[in-house]
Image (spheres, rainbow, N blue to C red):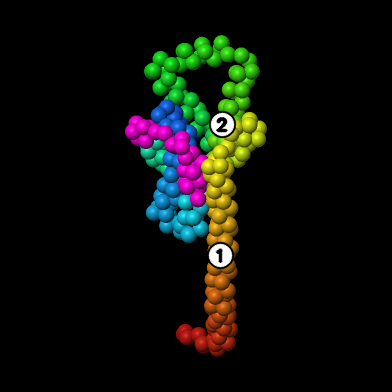
Amino acid sequence: LADVLRSMAPVTVLFSLMLWTSGKALRFVSMPTFTVFKNLAVVGTTAWEFFRFGNKVSYGVLASLSLMVSGSVIAGYGDLTFSREGVLWMLVNVVTTVAYVAALKELVPHDISSGAKTLHNNLLSLILFSVVAAAGGELEPFWSALQEQTTGFQLALLFTGVIGTAINMSTFWATRVTSGATYAFVGASNKVPVAIIGHFAFHSVLTVAGWTGVALGLGSGFVYAITKERERRQGKASQAASLAETAPLVKQFHSDEDSSEDDRAELPSLPRCGP
């Protein structure tokens, strides 16, 4: 238990900083500006994996990242409002987001289940935020305001906690089975279905620029998926070719070994010397 808590502590701190800086930034920047900066975190994660693990960044990946960032810029064109303080908080958020993904890949043991990781992460986050809220005098007013809300609101808040737990668990699973860049890219691409669902379910208005941004976002997802599938097939083909080249050498080695054993068996036994 102590080892799990020790390995999860820096991850939880970075996770909490990522959430906190997001909230601080949203006070000074518009949502489209926030989305543009969050997409830059995907670029930062890709760059980190390139320098840390030497992961190849193909032209297809670069094209998909360019489509994603340009799509968010076009979709939010005309509403990209921000301030100097907002940009500062967004840059801190980008750094903490990249550091959080890096910590997930580097520090979290893979032999621990996603459920155990989620439990420890949520408990540590709850303790951390509770201490900070109590120090700022916000804990008691929050609890009083929550009790004054309707039952429907309280159930909805509980449901968001359940959904957040599921997202947290899927995050630990995804970072274990795939690269940090793929995880970050998929996380950034969720703005596309959110925009489409919001338009049809809640009748939110999407301008021509908005639809263009959605189209570019979908295009970036397709380009990224096709690129990764092509890289996977190329990796399998390269591995098969490598095995085909080494197979004759292995066969020849075993053949030489068998011949040596036969030669040793055919050697005449020497007469025993003795009194």
Q: Is residue 119 magenta?
A: no
Give the residue at x 39% y 18%: 136
- Name the foreground residue: 9 vs 133: 133
User: Callout 2, which amino acid?
Assistant: Gly
Earlier in the chain: of badge 2 and badge 1, it is 2
Along the line of sight, the residue nearer the viewer: 164 or 198: 198
Task: Locate residue 19: give its quadrant.
Answer: top left
Q: Quadrant of residue 107?
A: top left
The residue segment tinted magenta is 67-88
Q: Residue visible at 33% across and 33% down?
A: 84
Disc 2 to disc 1, C-alpha distance: 37 Å
Regarding residue 103, the answer to whether it shows in the image is: no
Residue 124 percent coordinates (x, y): 47, 29
Residue under label 2: 164
| Residue labelled with disc 1 | 234
Q: How many marks?
A: 2
